Image: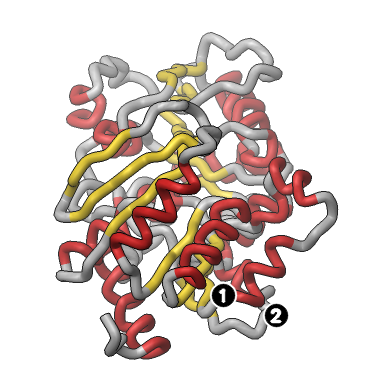
């Protein structure tokens, strides 16, 4: 939501970013990286009027809506009101979101797909399911290659004050909902720790309220600053993608996969569409060491194999935010042409 506008603005395109904040009642605004950013509290009844005023003043050629179906409907309204093209950024299957129940059975997601002038999909799985009349484009989650890169394990651990050079670290960074497979990962690393007590799990992110107390061999670091994530990845001997199968995960496209790959750390992953379809080349390179989703024993064997004799996957060569932004701008020009009335 930030990186694509940032690079479009850098290329010279008039760009403005409006955010709807579901978690606070504070309005914020700033100018950053050459474009304006304004955050409006979604629960403030004045916000829709302010959003309309912003769009009228800006006079957009294209309105891109990303986040959920409520934001999608707002974007569609603003686009039609301002004689602009409407692009729905479907970075997930929005019909699986908890708030979708508010539509009381109405297929709001399908309505948006049918009425968009173009649809952006972050995952190949979602794109393969596209049946609407609207044209679609693949817009995967990108990565900042200047930030995510290999760092020596010892240097990375030193950078974050992790003085555990004698430990073998299996790492996971990110959300911990059940379908992310973190519970399977804890169980798998526990099996390995029983055999070799140097093996620890490095865990970063927000713990679920229903998770069992973490064992002593889990080095839990909480939510870490984005600027430090590269060090936490490189501090690990193996990084894990223990995803289970689910509608949400199968249709998604996790940012961390490209970040792991660019840091060139051995990956212990499961066979889920989130990895197999979004990174087919890398998944093929790791095919011999991929585990079945939800199989703790097989995940433990995969981790051990990647510790003993790592199989490496190549870094993706075309997934920087700048490359993705440039491709999309070209696609928009081909689809919509240049407006002559602006």
User: Residue 287 versus residue 277: which sits nearer the camera?
Assistant: 277
Mark 1 = which residue? 116
Q: Is residue 341 visible?
A: yes
User: According to the image, label 2 marks what residue?
Assistant: 131
User: Which color scheme is applied?
Assistant: secondary structure
Residue visible at 43% across and 20% down in the picture: 222
Residue 206, compared with residue 84, is above or below; it is: above
Query: In this image, 257 relative to 250: left or right?
Result: left
- Please tell me which of labels 2 and 1 falls first in the chain: 1
Quadrant location of the C terminus in the rendered image? bottom left
Where residue 33 appears, x then y in whole percent? 16, 51
- SS class of the residue under badge 1? loop
Residue at the image point whose x is 65% and y is 55% from the top = 94
CA–CA distance between discs 2 and 1?
13 Å
Horizontal relation, residue 219 to residue 110: left or right:
left
Across and down, in percent, residue 14 comes to 22, 67
Mark number displayed over residue 258: none
From the viewer's perspective, is the residue at label 2 or at label 1 nearer?
1
Q: Residue furthest right?
A: 105
Question: Which residue is at a point 36% across and 26% down the rendered structure image?
Answer: 224
Mark 2 residue crowding within 10 angstroms, few (<14) / some (14–19) / many (20+): few
Q: Secondary structure at mark 2?
A: loop
């Amino acid at each position: 939501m930030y990186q694509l506008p940032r690079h479009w603005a850098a290329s010279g395109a008039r760009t403005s970013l409006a955010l709807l904040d579901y978690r606070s009642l504070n309005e914020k605004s700033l100018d950053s990286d050459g474009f304006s950013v304004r955050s409006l509290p979604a629960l403030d009844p004045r916000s829709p009027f302010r959003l309309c005023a912003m769009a009228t003043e800006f006079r957009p050629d294209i309105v891109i809506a990303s986040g959920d179906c409520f934001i999608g409907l707002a974007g569609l309204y603003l686009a039609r009101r301002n004689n602009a093209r409407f692009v729905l950024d479907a970075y997930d299957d929005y019909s699986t979101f908890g708030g979708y129940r508010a539509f009381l059975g109405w297929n709001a997601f399908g309505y948006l797909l049918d009425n968009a002038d173009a649809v952006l999909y972050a995952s190949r799985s979602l794109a393969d399911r596209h049946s609407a009349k609207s044209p679609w484009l693949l817009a995967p989650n990108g990565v900042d290659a200047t930030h995510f890169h290999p760092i020596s394990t010892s240097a990375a651990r030193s950078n974050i004050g992790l003085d555990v050079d004698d430990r073998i670290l299996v790492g996971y960074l990110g959300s911990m909902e059940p379908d992310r497979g973190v519970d399977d990962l804890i169980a798998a690393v526990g099996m390995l720790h029983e055999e070799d007590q140097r093996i620890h799990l490095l865990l970063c992110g927000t713990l679920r309220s229903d998770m069992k107390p973490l064992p002593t061999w889990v080095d839990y670091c909480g939510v870490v600053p984005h600027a430090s994530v590269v060090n936490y990845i490189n501090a690990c001997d193996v990084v894990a993608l223990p995803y289970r199968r689910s509608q949400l995960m199968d249709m998604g496209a996790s940012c961390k996969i490209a970040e792991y790959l660019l840091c060139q750390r051995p990956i212990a992953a499961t066979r889920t569409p989130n990895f197999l379809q979004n990174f087919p080349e890398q998944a093929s390179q790791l095919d011999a060491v991929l585990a079945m989703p939800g199989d703790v024993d097989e995940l433990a064997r995969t981790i051990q194999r990647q510790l003993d004799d790592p199989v490496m996957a190549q870094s993706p060569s075309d997934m920087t935010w700048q490359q993705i932004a440039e491709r999309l701008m070209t696609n928009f020009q081909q689809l919509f042409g240049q407006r002559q009335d602006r």
